[in-house]
Image (spheres, rainbow, N blue to C red):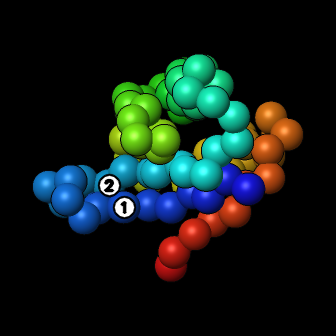
Amino acid sequence: MCRVRRETKGRGGREATVIWDVPGGDTELKSLGKAIKQRIGTGGSVKDGQIVIQGDHVDTVLTFLKHKGFQAKKAGG
């Protein structure tokens, strides 16, 4: 099950949406990260088994992941 949360800690006060516990290998993670960034139209990165998207896009990412067939859950507050 994928987990999605919004973070600001350690990012200079900027918001980021973090996705982790994504099933699959490194190549699947990179292709999913690219698809999410293209869908939202923002930047981001894939590292350490996490996808980091710039900005607060938790609800959009959850909808996208569920549409792609992933089980996704909002984590944190």
Q: Identify the residue position indicated by label 2 in the image.
A: 15
Type of residue at label 2? Glu
Instruction: Where is residue 32? Give x, y as percent.
Output: 62, 28
Label drawn at residue 61:
none
Between 23 and 37, which is closer to the camera in this rendering?
Answer: 23
Circle 2 Cα neighbour tier, 10 Å, few/some/many (<14 / 14–19 / ≥20): some
Q: Is mark 2 in CB contact (under 8 Å) with mark 1?
A: yes
In the image, residue 66 lies at what x, y percent? Answer: 80, 46
Q: Residue furthest bottom?
A: 77
Q: Residue furthest front?
A: 25
Position of 42 with respect to 59 (left or right) is left
> Is label 2 or label 1 in front?
1
Near-viewer residue (25 or 59): 25
* Residue at x 39% of width, y 35% of height: 47
Residue at 67% x, 53% y: name it.
2
> In the rendered image, which residue does mark 1 sit on?
7
Residue at 63 percent across and 30 percent down: it is 25
Residue 30 against residue 57 in the figure, above or below: above
Across and down, in percent, residue 63 comes to: 73, 47
Q: Is residue 63 above or below residue 36?
A: below
Relative to residue 36, is residue 71 depicted above or below?
Answer: below
Let me know if residue 29 appears in the view. yes
Question: Which quadrant holds the N terminus?
Answer: bottom right
Would you identify the image quadrant in which residue 44 lies? top left
Disc 1 element = strand
